[in-house]
Image: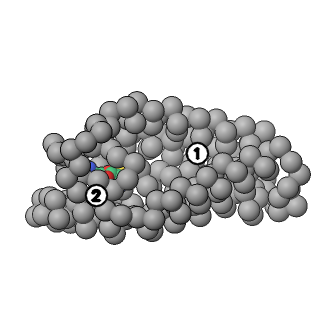
């Protein structure tokens, strides 16, 4: 049954993202930083789609299930819902400043409001949280961990480059923003 919640969560995230994909203008790229996108997309496709898909339609990976009480799986479901909320909220707050890769476009604004008041990377935080939630929900060493590992790789490959790009574009404004926010863990009490 929890496999259905996994699939529902994925669909919810695709639906949340769809309108923002449409907002992306085709040109006006001012700056773009390279990440190994082909590698990352391949890892994500395998980790988030192919492995869970094989798990749901075959007996593959079922021997890697571990015993986990229902309350543990339900807390995974609650965490999954919270992560999807955070995913939605960060898209809403970033608005037309969201891009699937590391880019600065003309008219790009630094967002410091909404959820971005507390953390600089709430969207990455939401995907990592969602990954942890799937581990609890699916209770499987391979299928449960593969989404988290995929998102972790994306995060690690991107976050420093993204912050450098933002620093180059927004300078002191981003520096002062960094002082009042956490990278992925919210800084609730300002200095
Ligand atoms: N790292 C952020 C955003 C991910 S989307 C998060 O996890 O919430 C990646 C794009 O968002 C990058 O191309 C960058 O240009 C843009 N971006 C990241 N932080 C931003 C901010 N505070 N304001 C405006 N754009 C931002």
| Residue at screen point 34% across, 46% down | 99
Q: Position of residue 49 (x, y in %)?
A: 66, 48
Residue tagged by mark 2?
32
Residue tagged by mark 1?
80
Vertical order, 50 against 10 (above or below): below
Does the image show residue 14?
Answer: yes
Q: Is residue 148 left or right of residue 57?
A: left
Q: How many marks?
A: 2
Does the image show residue 122?
Answer: no
Q: Position of residue 53 (x, y in %)?
A: 74, 46
Considering the numbered disc 1 on the image, is that residue within a helix, a strand or a loop?
helix
| Residue at screen point 58% across, 58% down | 42
Vertical order, 128 against 161 (above or below): above
The 10 Å Cα crowd at callout 2, few under 14, some 14 to 19, many 20 or more, is few
Q: Is residue 189 left or right of residue 145?
A: left
Considering the numbered disc 2 on the image, is that residue within a helix, a strand or a loop?
strand
Q: Is residue 7 left or right of residue 38?
A: right
Q: Residue furthest left?
A: 172
Q: Residue furthest front?
A: 27
The 10 Å Cα crowd at callout 1, few under 14, some 14 to 19, many 20 or more, is many
Comparing labels 1 and 2, the label whose residue is closer to the camera: 2
Q: Position of residue 182 (x, y in %)?
A: 32, 63
Front residue of this view, candidates 82 and 125: 125
| Residue at screen point 43% across, 55% down | 124
Q: CA distance from mark 1 to mark 2?
A: 32 Å
Examine the image and state in which quarter residue 181 appears: bottom left
In the image, is the residue at mark 1 within 8 Å of ligand 1 by its beta carbon?
no
Quarter of the figure that contains the C terminus = bottom left
Q: Is residue 184 left or right of residue 112?
A: right
């Amino acid at each position: 049954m929890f496999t259905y919640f996994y699939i529902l969560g994925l669909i919810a995230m695709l639906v949340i993202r769809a309108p923002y994909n449409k907002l992306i203008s085709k040109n006006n790229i001012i700056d773009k930083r390279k990440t190994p996108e082909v590698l990352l997309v391949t890892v994500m496709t395998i980790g988030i789609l192919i492995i869970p898909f094989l798990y749901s339609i075959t007996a593959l990976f079922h021997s890697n299930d571990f015993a986990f009480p229902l309350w543990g799986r339900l807390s995974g479901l609650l965490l999954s819902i919270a992560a999807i909320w955070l995913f939605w909220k960060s898209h809403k707050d970033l608005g037309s400043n969201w891009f699937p890769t590391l880019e600065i476009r003309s008219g790009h604004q630094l967002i410091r409001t909404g959820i971005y008041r507390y953390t600089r990377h709430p969207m990455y935080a939401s995907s990592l949280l969602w990954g942890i939630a799937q581990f609890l929900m699916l209770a499987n060493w391979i299928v449960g961990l593969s989404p988290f590992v995929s998102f972790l790789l994306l995060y690690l490959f991107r976050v420093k480059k993204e912050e450098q790009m933002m620093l180059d574009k927004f300078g002191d404004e981003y520096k002062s923003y960094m002082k009042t926010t956490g990278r992925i863990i919210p800084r609730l009490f300002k200095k």
